[in-house]
Amino acid sequence: MKRLLTRLNIDTYIILLASMVLLASILPARGIGATVAGICADAGIFALFFLHGARLSRQAVVDGARHWRLHLTVAAMTFVIFPLCGIAIRAIPHLDPAIGTGMLFLTLLPSTVQSSIAFTAMARGNVAAAVCSASFSNLAGIFITPLLVALLITGKQGGFSVDAVMTIVFQLLLPFLAGHFLRPWIAEWIARRKTMLMVVDRGSILLVVYTAFSAAVVEGLWARISLAYFGTVALLSAILLTIVLLLSREVGRWFGFSREDSIVLQFCGSKKSLASGVPMAGVLFTAPQIGVVILPLMFFHQFQLMICAVLARRYAAAIEREEIATAG
């Protein structure tokens, strides 16, 4: 089964996420169970952002500043072009407001780290620049994403308040800064326990997804969502990914980036982070809203992995053909 999923470019983690949605649909957390699950999910979010901070090398921040044109362009794709697309999608006439909100939230998130770097390496791009760009995006997302959500989503609903700011600070920013501050003492310990920490990372997100969909199911989620709803989300996610992939490729040409840097722009500038998005949604939205809000992100995450895997292989194959032709 794992071999089949790999061949189809289907992330096994998506299967686990879908399993959490199914479990929440059949056995949603209620009453005391929901309270306990919520506390555990909050603890997981705290741990997740603490580890994000601990993994961010200070040297990566310093090195990133040297290639500022590329990193600013990636940041513009992530936090300007993407949100403009999200605003345009939400303005589509007769679109379900819940879909519009979920799609807009998706566009406000930072880029991924692991998959952006992995696809850049696979495509034989500038891996060092990809590390810096992806790290910068995640660091900036701690500040920029909540601000954009407040300006474009929750603020318009009257939901952004001093309490919301304090929640963001205590659950996202402080653990991130604490992890980064303690990095000199814990970096080696973390490096030796990658498997265990990956379980913490992914387990935290799975728990947030379960609690989010539990709350939404209790509030009557499946009575409001149809197959047409899922189809619309999938279609819009696919269209959005196509637009940003094409646009990032053209922007690289307009700015005269080398092929290696253009690969960085395409793979770092077209991604959205599930690892950051799910816990951020858990902090920024009310419990019944979270399940609906993260649905587009789950679709987009799978699409970006499938399509970018194909693109990375094609880029690598093209470079290999050129090298063979040159050698010949």
Image (cartoon, rainbow, N blue to C red):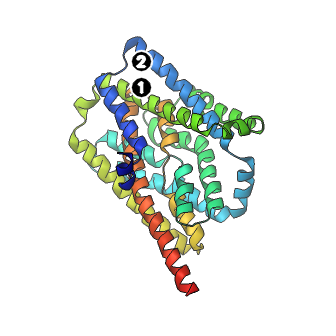
> Quick one: label 1 or label 2, which is nearer the N terminus?
2
Q: Residues within 10 Å of mark 1 (few under 14, many from 20)?
A: many
Q: Residue at x 44, y 39 (%)?
A: 153
- Camera-nearest residue between 284 and 257: 257
User: Mark 2 = which residue?
Assistant: 34
Q: Amino acid at mark 2?
A: Ala
- Quadrant housing the C terminus: bottom right
Q: Residue at x 54, y 56 (%)?
A: 118
Q: Secondary structure at mark 2?
A: helix
Q: Residues within 10 Å of mark 2 (few under 14, many from 20)?
A: some
Q: Residue at x 33, y 52 (%)?
A: 236
Position of 86 with respect to 26 (left or right) is right
Spot the residue most to the bottom: 328
Give the image location of residue 33, x and y in percent. 41, 15
Position of 98 with respect to 35 (left or right) is left
Give the image location of residue 310, x and y in percent. 41, 63
Quarter location, residue 194: top right
Q: CA distance from mark 1 to mark 2?
A: 7 Å
Q: Against 157, is 236 above or below?
A: below
Give the image location of residue 110, x and y in percent. 54, 48
Q: Against 239, is 297 above or below?
A: above
- Quadrant housing the N terminus: top left
Confirm or deny contact between disc 1 and disc 2 (CB under 8 A). Answer: yes
Q: Against 215, is 96 above or below?
A: below
User: Mark 1 = which residue?
Assistant: 211
Q: Amino acid at mark 1?
A: Thr
Give the image location of residue 44, x and y in percent. 54, 28
- Camera-nearest residue between 93 and 13: 13
